[in-house]
Image (cartoon, rainbow, N blue to C red):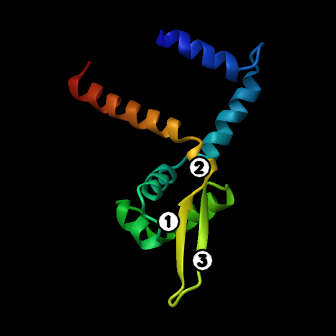
Amino acid sequence: MEQEKRNQMAAEVLSNPRNQQEEIQALQDTLYVLGGKWKLPIINSICNGNKRFRDIERSIPGITTRMLSKELKEMTANQLIKRTVIDDTPVTIEYTSTDYCRSFGDIILEMIKWGKQHRQKLKTGG
């Protein structure tokens, strides 16, 4: 049943006949937008309710202030997150995920699931 579901999904996504160049470009586009060490942890942090820079920074072990700033700018440019300036005293800035970002939530859940299974497979050796 699971294989049938995968075959149906593949038929909906992949062209017939297959266009390898188009598929590679799509994979490269996805990796460009989501790839790297920090983007998915940042998205996860924001989706877990961290909206302010320092809260996001504290929730991700090992990320530097400079790297977080760079990644947030890129992710805003790619419309994955929204940067909102709240004109208060003092001025605060909040980051939230966009609908576009949430559109790949199922992919992230599958990645988390796969990662857990992979770690377990390595622990058990089988």
Answer with the quarter of the image where residue 55 lies.
Answer: bottom left
Q: Which mark is residue 85?
A: 3
Kind of residue sitting beneath label 1? Leu
Badge 1 is on which residue?
A: 68
Task: Please report the residue visible at 45 percent of the width from the left and 37 percent of the height from the top.
Answer: 109
Answer with the quarter of the image where residue 58 lies.
Answer: bottom left
Label 2 vs 1, first from the N-terminus:
1
Task: Please report the residue visible at 47 percent of the width from the left and 13 percent of the height from the top.
Answer: 2
Q: Is residue 14 above or below residue 70?
A: above
* Residue at the bottom extreme, as displayed: 89
Where does residue 60 sit, x and y in percent of width and height? 38, 60
Kind of residue sitting beneath label 3? Val
Q: Is residue 67 above or below residue 32?
A: below
Where does residue 81 sit, x and y in percent of width and height? 59, 59
Label 1 vs 3, first from the N-terminus:
1
Separation (CA) of disc 3 from disc 2: 20 Å
Assign a secondary structure to mark 3: strand
Q: Is residue 20 left or right of residue 48?
A: right
Q: Is residue 31 left or right of residue 1?
A: right
Where does residue 16 sit, x and y in percent of width and height? 77, 14
